[in-house]
Image (cartoon, rainbow, N blue to C red):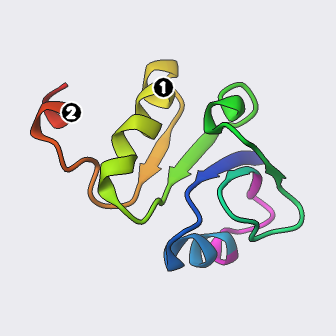
Amino acid sequence: MIKLGMIGTDSIHSKKFLGSCDPDQFVFTHIYGDKLEDNAVYVDNPFDMLTEIDGVMIVSRHGKEHYKYAKPFIEKGIPIWIDKPFTIDINEANE
């Protein structure tokens, strides 16, 4: 079972992803954002899930949020799926 985290619940994509993953293979165990699912732990700080998950989805509505959430997970080597765009800042993209 692969434990996933989700950052950002302010877009319609978050509900779609929660409902489309095969529950025999993936489970969302940690979520940062508004409550969407009863079985997950809702964290006050998205980085609290760094040691608790196998992968993370970043689906915040605005691309300006994606890089700051993704960077610590990238540095830790945790697989990430990031909703478009990865960033809206060319300097962040180059880094």
Between 91 and 53, the one lying in front of the other is: 91
Verify CB contact (< 8 Å) between mark 2 and mark 1. no
| Tag 2 secondary structure | helix
Few, some or many C-alpha atoms within 10 Å of disc 2 (few <14, some 14-19, many ≥20)? few
Residue under the image location 21 percent in, 33 percent down? 92
Please state the extent of the stretch shown in magenta in the rendering.
Answer: 19-29
Q: Badge 2 is on which residue?
A: 92
User: Would you say 85 lies left or right of 90 here?
Assistant: right
Q: Position of residue 43 (x, y in %)?
A: 75, 43
Between 77 and 40, the one lying in front of the other is: 40
Image vertical order of residue 94 relative to residue 87, above or below = above
Residue under the image location 74 percent in, 57 percent down? 25
Image vertical order of residue 75 relative to residue 21, above or below = above
Position of the C terminus by quadrant: top left
Give the Cα distance between marks 2 and 1. 13 Å
Q: Earlier along the polypeptide chain: callout 2 or callout 1?
A: 1
Q: Is residue 21 rendered magenta in the image?
A: yes
The type of residue carrying mark 1 is: Pro
The circle drawn on residue 72 is 1
| Residue 24, picture quadrant | bottom right
User: Would you say 85 lies left or right of 30 here?
Assistant: left
Between 1 and 85, the one lying in front of the other is: 85
User: Would you say 63 lies left or right of 1 here?
Assistant: left
Residue under the image location 52 percent in, 79 percent down? 12
The type of residue carrying mark 2 is: Glu
The circle drawn on residue 40 is none
| Tag 1 secondary structure | helix
Residue under the image location 30 percent in, 61 percent down? 84
Q: Is residue 48 rendered magenta in the image?
A: no
Q: Position of residue 69 (x, y in %)?
A: 46, 39
Q: Residue furthest top?
A: 75
| Residue 48, picture quadrant | top right
